[in-house]
Amino acid sequence: MADIVLRDVEKFFGSVQVIRKVNLTIKDGEFVVLLGPSGCGKTTTLRAIAGLEDITSGEIVIDGKPVQNLHAADRDIAFVFQLYALYPHLSVFENIAFPLRATRQPRSAVERQVRQVAAALGIEHLLARKPGALSGGDMQRVAIGRALVRRPKAILMDEPIGALDAKLREDMRMELKRLHIENKSTSVYVTHDQVEAMALADRIVVMHDGVLQQVGTPSDVYAHPANLFVAQFIGSPVMNIAPAAVKTEGGRVRLALGGGAAAFEMPAELAPRLSATGAGGALSIGVRPEGVQLAREPATGTIDLEAHLIEPLGAYDIVDLKVGEGFLRARTPAGFVARPGDRVHARLDPAQTHFFDQRSGASLG
Ligand code: ATP
């Protein structure tokens, strides 16, 4: 297994630039997820690492060796696609054994390695079958087995479970995580599904328009989004984002939302940070639904708001609170707000309230 380093990598298709100055180090044994919306350049980045796509400029180094001039076959990397790309006329055994055939190892060694990987994936009983007789999940297990069997330097996966139904996707997600914990293969995984990214990644790379927006652990990007794009892309339901006017009077800080429809009192300690940015209105706040705290009785820092809509999700509810023309979404224990129209007392948890420069989108901390 090996480190993968991208230095100033750029890619143009004709005159269209799809990757912009990407710098990234993927550490030996790490599971890194490239996450972003459709068209942000994550597949192109993955294909560039694999050697399936030339880069326009920059350098890609695998295990200390620049590889941008090496063919895909000479990079010792395995690639798993969304569509399984199995050989339909070969058995599962032969599909998994395929990459070992070129190595001219004795039959017994091939058999041992295929059985080992099949056991790890729980598909030993399927070895004699043809791919056509497998479920989607099992086909993908075979494709992963084929990628792992020759112990490549790294394994690259492009939405490998995107074609499976929701329940199977969840099972496979956990299996991939278990496999990674056992094998510690350097893994780069592309998805547009932030839940998948959060569940699998040691580190998430959030991409947008060919630019790396943030690189960090799942908890890091969730709790400290670097900008408005990351804040809104990570987390479900999405973070509340609203333009806010900050007023500091006599050491107190008030955050007015919804054109002044709601003014939350915040700790005085925030004052220097917010005034230092020269915000004066060009500021947005971001707060996740769990950061909007509700109470039945008024308390310090709460304001009175009306519940507009209640979405019961079983373990908890999501409640839309009216703030001017917009809404603030709160996460509450199930049944906390009985019906739309009820009034509740809301406060913003200062530790979970983020501030963003409205123009650049950058986090102000
Ligand atoms: P998706 O999840 O939809 O695959 P992505 O984030 O993986 O999206 P890429 O597939 O890397 O994005 O594509 C990035 C941009 O490059 C897109 O605008 C796409 O249309 C364009 N693109 C990709 N491959 C080619 C190609 N061979 N020729 C021209 N443009 C391409």
Image: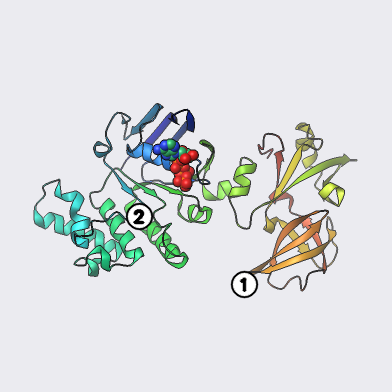
- Which dot marks residue 227? none
Identity of the residue drawn at 68% across and 72% down: 334
Instruction: Please state which of residues 154 and 56 is positioned toward the viewer in this rendering.
Output: 56
Q: Amino acid at mark 2?
A: Leu
Residue 252 sits in which quadrant? Answer: top right
| Cα gap from disc 1 to disc 2, whole angstroms | 34 Å
54 in relation to 293, above or below:
above
**Ligand 1 appears in which quadrant?**
top left
- Outermost residue on the right side: it is 250
User: Relative to 142, is 336 on the left or the right?
Assistant: right
- Which dot marks residue 83? 2
Query: Which residue in the structure is indicated by mark 1?
Result: 314
Question: Is residue 118 visible in this depiction of the protein?
Answer: yes
Numbered disc in front, either 1 or 2: 2
Question: Is residue 41 visible in this depiction of the protein?
Answer: no
Residue 147 x %, y %: 28, 51
